[in-house]
Image (cartoon, rainbow, N blue to C red):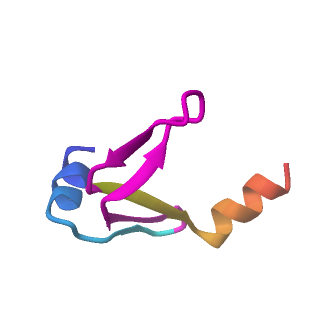
Amino acid sequence: FETLAQELLKSNKIKISSFGTFRVINKKERVGRNPKTKERAIILPRKVVQFKPSLLVKEKLNNL
């Protein structure tokens, strides 16, 4: 996990065979709303990790 985290901090794409791919995405600043109060709020730019499962993982999940 430490190696995975270090590579993601460098914004590298990581592919694990027969499991899936992790990559870092930069999200832009945007305006959001609190659904309860309808108050507007600025959502700051940030980085998030995206995971895309392999076809093998998708098939196993859908054939349970």
What residue sits 54% from the left and 28% below the top? 37
Residue at the image point whose x is 74% and y is 57% from the top: 60
Above or below 2: residue 49: below
**What x and y, as percent, mark residue 12?**
23, 70
Q: Is residue 40 left or right of residue 1?
A: right
Viewer-nearest residue: 60 or 49: 49
Q: Quadrant of the N terminus?
A: top left
The spot of residue 61 in percent (x, y) is 74, 53
Is 53 included in the stretch rendered in magenta? no
Compared to residue 49, the image places residue 15 above or below, namely: below
Residue at figure coordinates x 23%, y 50% from the top left: 5
Q: Is residue 62 left or right of residue 19?
A: right
Nearer to me, 52 or 54: 52
Residue lying at the far top of the rendered structure: 36
Question: Residue 56, position in %: x, y?
Answer: 66, 67
Residue 45 among magenta residues: yes
Q: Residue at x 27, y 50 (%)?
A: 44
> Of 20 and 8, which appears nearest the observer?
8
For residue 11, above or below residue 3? below
Magenta residues?
Answer: 18-46
